[in-house]
Amino acid sequence: MTHLKKISLAVFSTIASVTPVVGFAEEAKEGFIEGSTLNLLSRTFYMNRDSRKGQSAPSGKGYSEATGQGFIGKFESGFTQGTFGVGVDAFVLSGFKLDTGGGRNGGQSSFNVLPVDKDGNAKDEYTKVGGSVKARAFDTVVNVGDVFPSTPVVSFGDSRLLPESFRGVTAINKSFSGLTVQGGRLHSMSQPQSTSMRDNFVTFYGGPVNSPWIGYFGGDYEATDRLTVGLYGSRLKDAWDQKYASASYVLPLSDQMALTTSLNYYNATDEGKKLLGKFDNDIWSAKVALQYGSHTLALSHQRNQGDDDFDYLRQSDSIYVANSIQYSDFNSPKERSWMVTYNLDMTNFGVPGLTFMTRYGKGTDGDYSNANSVYMRRDVDGNPLKDQKRWERDIEAKYVVQTGSLKDLSLRLRQATTRATAFESDLDEVRLIVEYPLSVL
């Protein structure tokens, strides 16, 4: 974590310098044009959210609903041949309103399916265009521009009609077998329903932060064919330092049975100007999953041992704990949660491509007694909330077409129900997502 702001291309140049030339020689043959890909993803996204107590909807009725059609086009060139190769990545993301209105669009809230103007009306369409220049030296690839990082401490979100993106510099190195090292420094981000980049950042629980950049560095290592470990750190300038560690182990018990165990741990502390107040949070989760043929049953436990919400960038997927699910993160101060999850793969029952999932999580002991002013939540009498509880139940069915002209077309239906005491909403939520990928190049 120390001196994260000094992460630069020099770090990755050093890593690249120890890479065997043989690995580079094999990759250099692809060429700028020959190594290019162009992919298009069509995504139809429907979502409704019924806040049972009437919270957080502009209509005052507590109900939001929207349907949109998205197209996600991504071009990735190969690299020019030679010791130092260059290339470009580019994307066009377009979203179109299919149905919403009458106060149902969700307004300026976490619903975030479609962009909303200053009068609260959903826009008919929106488009994002972006790209980056990239360079490769041996097994190190550096991107400068619009990027989609995916790490436990900084990750782009893709749970709405269109994905979000970041702008800055990223680098990934795969010099050593089983080891992936990556890092970056980013100075702006977009939201899923936004057409432009936002300088500075927004966190999910603390709100907007006047931070000039976020930097991260770390890696994942496949130590054996059964054991994988990860270690990362990040700094949101003048807001937080985060450290992350993980381990996952798969133990085969028979030809059809395997036991998987995993641990995830974060430590988050205030940094610099302390724009989100003073805090020192530890949150961890442990999960055990038993797979038998088509069935997988998992049990997980999670605890936030800090006095404040464990926070992350808004609408991003930068929270790799076991009990962060469709709506709830179970990350309130002092909160303890348990979850049981069941997955079923129908391949062995003659229906390849069809899967089901259901899970139930319950959190208790949420306590804001010692929260700082940014994360403090109070009751109607002005007292800090104590002994807060919640539960969430999710059900999902997904089918992916296996053959024919519609091969890889996927349909996913997700339903969530959550109930809570004063600090959280009671809601029912349904999402229907239809995706069809097309490889053009």
Image: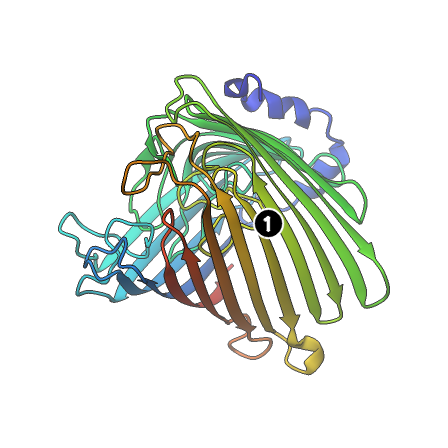
Identify the coloring: rainbow
> Residue 114: horizontal and vertical position, in percent?
28, 56
Q: Is residue 106 visible?
A: yes
Q: Is residue 129 above or below residue 276?
A: below
**In the picture provided, is 189 more to the left or to the right than 391?**
left
- For disc 1, the marked residue is 322
Q: Amino acid at mark 1?
A: Ala
> Residue 362: horizontal and vertical position, in percent?
53, 55
Q: Which of 167/383 is in front?
A: 383
Q: How many marks?
A: 1
Q: Residue at x 21, y 57 (%)?
A: 122
Residue 32 lies in quadrant: top right
Q: Secondary structure at mark 1?
A: loop
**In the picture provided, is 420 more to the left or to the right than 302?**
left
Question: Of all residues shown, which one is farthest toward the right?
Answer: 254
> Residue 391: horizontal and vertical position, in percent?
48, 57
Q: Is residue 193 above or below residue 25?
A: below
Q: Which of 177/412 is in front?
A: 412
On the rendered image, what quadrant is the N terminus found in? top right
The local crowd at label 1, few if under 14, some if 14 to 19, many if 20 or more residues have their Cα within 10 Å, is many
Q: Is residue 269 above or below residue 67?
A: above
Q: Which of 372/263 is in front?
A: 372
Q: Residue at x 35, y 45 (%)?
A: 191
Q: Is residue 203 visible?
A: no
> Residue 97: horizontal and vertical position, in percent?
26, 63
Residue 125 lies in quadrant: bottom left
Residue 72 lies in quadrant: bottom left
